[in-house]
């Protein structure tokens, strides 16, 4: 599990699976998680791809320098990782915040992205009050106060009831996040706006929405699919963390798209 230092000195924790001779597939996590959120997908995807997953700055075992952060900063971290691994271009699968970084890469580093999967994500928040409220809340509270509310937004009630072990695993993953890094990421999400740049994306794109996702409702993914020329849209019966709630279907959906 290498540590790659990017241009501003921030260490980025990276894990690579699969053959070095296979096409690259880079995975990018949601806010408040780490690279282990993809554990259910790795075995199947690594049979076909050189799978690269990483902890975004402020998360997991990566560094958490003082903010503010930006989507451009996150994108440049990705490019630094690819350069260090000598990967000229990669497929991309990003969920939630990972899908936001994917939109930046698709528009600003098109030569580095082959196919693009944007999952359970958004391009722009007209109403920024929710993010401002969360940032304000964390001035006086720890991340542990957000664990249970996040699980309620991230997974359907039925899934939480029948899969307590997955919920426990995700709670533990969430608590690996640095609070300062989390806040800086919230600021970057609040301030992003890909509405003008998304139409310039040329990479074949699959947009995945969760039919029961309250965090990034289907309409947000539908808007992204409408902005990107030729983008395909798939709806899965899941809430926000669709790859963990529907692991087999999610794995197959992405694999079918990347191999088509």
Image (spheres, rainbow, N blue to C red):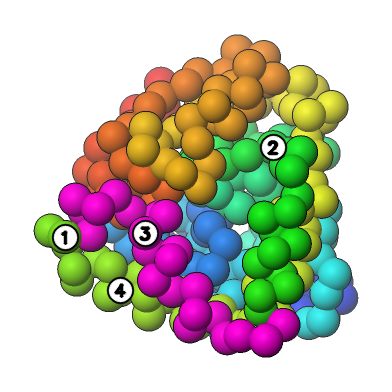
Q: Position of residue 109 (x, y in %)?
A: 79, 40
Q: CA distance from mark 2 to mark 4?
A: 28 Å
Badge number at residue 169: 4
Instruction: Identify the residue under disc 1.
Output: 161
Residue 79 to residue 65: above or below: above
Q: Nearer the viewer, mark 4 or mark 1?
A: 1
Dot 2: within a 10 Å radius of its alpha carbon, few (fewer than 14), some, or many (20 or more) residues?
many
Instruction: Report whether residue 89 is seen.
Output: no
Identify the secondary structure beneath mark 3: helix
Instruction: Identify the residue under disc 2.
Output: 123
Dot 4: within a 10 Å radius of its alpha carbon, few (fewer than 14), some, or many (20 or more) residues?
few
In the visual, does 150 lie left or right of 186? left
Where, by quadrant of the figure, is residue 8 drawn? bottom right
Residue appearing at x 48%, y 83% in the figure = 144
Q: CA distance from mark 3 to mark 2?
A: 23 Å
Q: CA distance from mark 3 to mark 4?
A: 14 Å
Instruction: Identify the residue under disc 3.
Output: 152
Dot 3: within a 10 Å radius of its alpha carbon, few (fewer than 14), some, or many (20 or more) residues?
some
**Is 150 one of the magenta-colored residues?**
yes
The front one of 43 and 163 is: 163
The front one of 162 and 88 is: 162
**Is 231 one of the magenta-colored residues?**
no
Q: Which residues, given as a range, are shown in magenta?
A: 139-160
């Amino acid at each position: 599990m290498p540590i790659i230092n990017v241009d501003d000195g921030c260490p980025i924790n990276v894990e690579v699976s699969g053959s070095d001779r296979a096409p690259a597939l880079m995975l990018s996590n949601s806010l408040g998680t780490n690279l282990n959120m993809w554990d259910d997908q790795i075995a199947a995807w690594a049979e076909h791809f050189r799978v690269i997953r990483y902890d975004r700055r402020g998360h997991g075992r990566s560094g958490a320098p003082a903010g503010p952060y930006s989507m451009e900063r996150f994108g440049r971290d990705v490019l630094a990782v690819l350069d260090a691994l000598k990967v000229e271009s990669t497929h991309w699968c990003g969920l939630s915040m990972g899908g936001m970084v994917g939109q930046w890469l698709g528009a600003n580093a098109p030569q580095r992205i082959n196919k693009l999967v944007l999952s359970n994500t958004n391009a722009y928040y007209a109403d920024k009050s929710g993010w401002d409220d969360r940032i304000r809340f964390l001035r006086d509270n720890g991340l542990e106060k957000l664990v249970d509310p996040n699980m309620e937004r991230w997974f359907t009630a039925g899934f939480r009831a029948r899969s307590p072990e997955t919920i426990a695993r995700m709670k533990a993953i969430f608590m690996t996040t640095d609070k300062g890094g989390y806040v800086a990421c919230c600021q970057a999400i609040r301030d992003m706006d890909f509405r003008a740049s998304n139409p310039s994306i040329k990479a074949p794109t699959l947009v995945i929405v969760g039919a029961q996702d309250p965090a990034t409702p289907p309409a947000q993914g539908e808007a992204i699919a409408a902005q990107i020329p030729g983008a395909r849209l798939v709806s899965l019966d899941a809430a926000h963390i669709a790859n963990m709630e529907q692991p087999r279907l999610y794995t197959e959906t992405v694999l079918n798209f990347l191999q088509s």
